[in-house]
Amino acid sequence: MINTTKIARSNLKQNKSKSILIIITIVLSTILLASVFMTCVDWNEANKERTRLYCGSQHGLFGGITQAKYNEVKAHADIESIGVVNGVGLKEYEDESKIGLSYMDKNAVDFNSMNLIEGKLPSKKNEIVLDDLALDRLGYEHKIGQKIKIQYDDYSKKGITDAEFILTGITTSSESSKTRRMYNAIVSEEYMKSTRDMNKEKLNLYIRLKNTKNLQGQEIIDKVNKVARDLDIPNYRVLANEDYIKSLKPDSEVITWGALIGIVIILSSILVIYNIFYLSIVTKVQEFGKLRAIGATKKQIKSIVLKEGIFLSSIAIPLGTIIGYIINKLVINKIFFEGTNISKLPIAIFIMLISFATVFVSLLKPMRVASKVSIIDAVRYNGEEKLNKKSRKGYESINIKRLSYANLSRNKKRTYITLISLSLSGILFIVVSSLLSSMDAEKLARDHFPYDLRISLDSYTFGDEDSPETEINILQTKNPLGQKFRDEISEMNGVKNIEIFKETKAELPEYNTEYKYHDFSSIDESDLGDLELYLQSGKIDLEKLKSGKEIILLSPELAKEINIEVGDKITITLYDGNEKVDKEFKVQAITSAPGTFAVHNDAFNKLFKNDTTTSIGIYTEKDKYTDVKNYIESLDKKNEYLQSASIDKELEVANLSINSTKIMAYSLVVIIGIIGFMNLINSMITSIITRKKELGMLQAIGLTNKQLIKMLNIEAMFYTLTMLVSSLTLGTGLGYIAVYAFRKTGASYASYELPLIQIIIMIVFSVVSQLLLTYLISKNFNKESLIDRVRYSE
């Protein structure tokens, strides 16, 4: 009786070199597969963590909330927890660094990820918590219990306040705090109440909602807004934490892209593992023919092949998964994702199942080949593809080039699989490089901040009955951004030109809308592109807009709410300082853009007596940028209703975002590239092993070592050049399409740029590594004596 298990084990022991090669290759493939999947999971987890650190873990923010309204919020059925924050004061330095003093309860501290390094939150009047950089800026040691003296501007009164505290805790400064140079100080509730009239204070409430586990991102955002409506909190005081919410519940587009990347990785690994087993098993079909000759059944032959694969996989796959986990934990996580802590057991099990399933699928063809051929054909089998009854082309003379191509055509399936794997890696590298090269940090920053500097109205309200003096239309009666101010800015040395943005308050007297007050703003020719990009209905005609009789509705949601369509007439109450004016407009178009209503700037100026400027964008000469910036920031400090911003800070944020994306994407692509290169290594080594006797005989009749290396180089160069040609043609084309599709998603800052440097790196690496591989293989091959090579037959 034939013992298939014993035969399988015996075959593996007898063919140790080939078994070791298979194990090593499967281990490497599994390592890469494990590290890629675990890295993807960690990437997702790290993205959540980064979002939590930068944006907080609250679902939303309700701003400017009175004590009475706070009690209503607490009682709402959908509120799970609330974090309370109230600004107390600010300490500013000449270098623009700041320390903000505020009261925060424990929930707010947790939501903002302000983890205590040591100590506790303040509870007594004279207690305070500072972050590490605030202590450094104040000039104190990181020591609990010491007295801290601070001079700061109190928000509730004019002038400088001197205060002395006992340090009870130290927190770690966040990356956003470091970037903005805005450090934190937390005072106690008792201190806050002792320094101001709490009946006049407006609190900021960080909220988390109940029962959000099964909701999608947009559903959570809608729920935040619904709670605000239930509590009659105006929309300008509501801010859903969209970045955090979307990081928890990726939308369908994100899931689709993630699945596509995962499929590419799995297919690359499947090609490698399949090729390994296919090439290693078909060379042993002769042995199975001999077993058939002594009585082995087809089922037993299949069993032997399957058991060999299972034995090798049982060693290689768990080992590869463990090493992949170690690499992920000790190398990748330490560099990119330090702090992530998620169980990898489910991923490890999934990877092993995928790998075992791939091995099983890979064995089906060799099992079928070994069991179905006749005994005579099996003994004659040499791994070459059948050419049916086609006549074979011969040559009167033979050379190194013809020998190389003869070997490549001997097993076309092996050649095609290797080429597909290598080309897939190269194409993916070019596509990703094209996408990453298209990401310009300055364009990204300019997309949101097109000017060099901006100064805007700040701290104004929009329908706040408790603070009528801060309403936007009232502030505009004595607008700090008035004509005199604008002339002063325009005439500054170094200012090239300025852009003016106008906006005021409006309402719809004929409709009972969700929000009482709406934005009424001006547009000009420069806004046409964005307005038409998101056009819902109608056609934008700037000349008709200049007449003042037509209007663009910027909110499709409002159009749906009040059942307004293009061509309808609508009466709008416009707030011009202390006056209100009713004006009828025809709806020219409906589009999606910030604000609610818009008319042309020419018509806007005729509608209002007061100066409705809310923001000024400033363009400067490069060498005068710093001087103008310093002056604008000095104006900001002098007026509590003004706020300045600069392109510098926008660039810092854009660079941080793009650079982290590039590091992660290139790491993933390089790993996939290694998978493809492994297939080339496997094909070359297997080709040498299966032709050892043949090459030995060629050397015996005069083939030199130099000619052998040249022959192997031609074979390897065929793979390399084919990969490069397919990568540079298909990859470049697909890269252009990918960038175009990326722009269509709203990434207007992306513009196609041929990734020339990356292409050169890929070409140099491919050629050099191929030459090195050929040299090492031939050197190892020549260690064995010529007689042993001629006698070789496994």
Image (tube, helix red, strand yellow):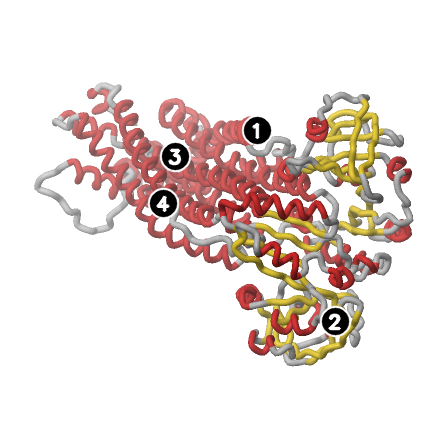
Which mark sits nearer the N-terminus, 1 or 2?
A: 1
In percent of width and height, residue 216 lies at: 68, 53
In 3D space, how far apart are the residues under numbered discs 3 and 4 (Cα atoms)? 25 Å
Residue at 30% over, 29% down? 772
Q: Spatial distance from mark 2 to mark 3, Cα to Cα? A: 70 Å
Q: Earlier in the sequence, mark 4 or mark 1?
A: 1
> Mark 2 or mark 4, which is nearer the start of the sequence?
2
- At x 13%, y 44%, the residue is 394
Residue 147 placed where, x, y %?
A: 81, 23
Q: The N terminus appears in which quarter of the rendering? A: top left
Query: Which residue has dot 1 on it?
Result: 334
Q: Which of marks 4 and 3 precedes in the sequence? A: 3
> CA separation, marks 1 and 3?
26 Å
Residue 574 is tagged as 2
Q: Quadrant of residue 83?
A: top right
Q: Which type of secondary structure does the marked residue at label 3 adopt?
A: helix
Q: Amino acid at mark 2?
A: Leu
Q: Residues within 10 Å of mark 2 (few under 14, many from 20)?
A: many
Amino acid type of the residue that numbered disc 3 sits on in the rendered structure: Met
